[in-house]
Image (cartoon, rainbow, N blue to C red):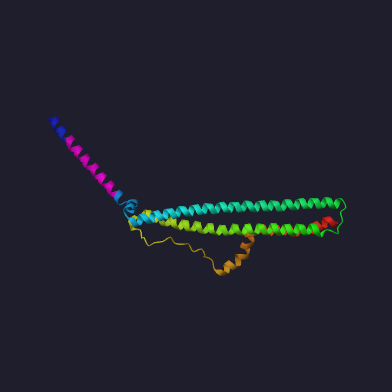
Amino acid sequence: MDSQSSHVVDISTAVISGKESHKQANSGELALQYHPLNQIVESPGHLLLFKLWQREEDLHGRRAAALEARMDAAKRAVFHLSCLFLAFHGLSFMLLFNASVAGASCHGWWLPCSLSLTTSLAVTVAVQAVVHTYWRISRRLQREREDGRALARCVRELRMKGADFDLSKEPQKSSKRMKSSSVEVKWRPLAWCSRNLITICLLSVAGILFPAFRFVLCS
């Protein structure tokens, strides 16, 4: 009798555990069915939009990486031109100093000074062109990053909402003009000076070296 009761208890426990596992399996299937990613897969429109936005997000990342590489190349170009500028004037100053020690005439002072000024202007124009390109690329990179962030927000919202996401929604372009025009006019000269600081320094050095060469030759 005891053995029969124990068998009955074991069978009832197994049935209960089987029902619980079946309920858990059904709840797991329901959770997967209503998961946002599963809803996106089952909806052709949402799936197409998801793939398009992922592809566009990847393109934004690649374009941003390419722009960063161009900015690094521009930095190296400015550094090399600045080193060339300083090396040329250092060598010129040393040669003129040796000529003045050797007793060279002061009548031809305008020739080395003109050569120095012409070279300085040529290098400065080249540096300014590279600097202008650098800041133009920097603005493009900033726009690419802002568009990429807006697109990433939309992709994240699509993943969270699933089929409830509005297909007519587009990534919002950020409006950057937060300051008033008076503040922009007030800070614009300072911003221009900070962006063209290297060009200003090169022009200042050229302006100082022009009379310095004449002083070295004629002193």
Q: Main secondary structure of the magenta part?
A: helix
Depth check, front residue: 116 or 75: 116
The reply, left or right, for residue 163 in relation to residue 141 is: left
Q: Which residue is painted at 80% across and 51% down in the image? A: 95
Q: Which residue is painted at 33% across and 52% down in the image? A: 41
Q: Is residue 58 above or below residue 18?
A: below
Which residues are drawn in magenta?
9-31
Q: Is residue 177 above or below residue 94?
A: below
Corner quadrant of residue 135: bottom right
Residue 84 at x, y percent in the picture:
70, 52
Quadrant of the snapshot with the C terminus: bottom right
Q: Judge whether residue 126 is colored magenta.
A: no
Q: Judge whether residue 11 is colored magenta.
A: yes
Residue reaching furthest to the bottom: 182
Can residue 122 be seen by looking at this rendering?
A: yes
Residue reaching furthest to the left: 1
The reply, left or right, for residue 83 in relation to residue 20 is: right
The reply, left or right, for residue 164 in relation to residue 173 is: left
Residue 100 at x, y percent in the picture:
85, 53
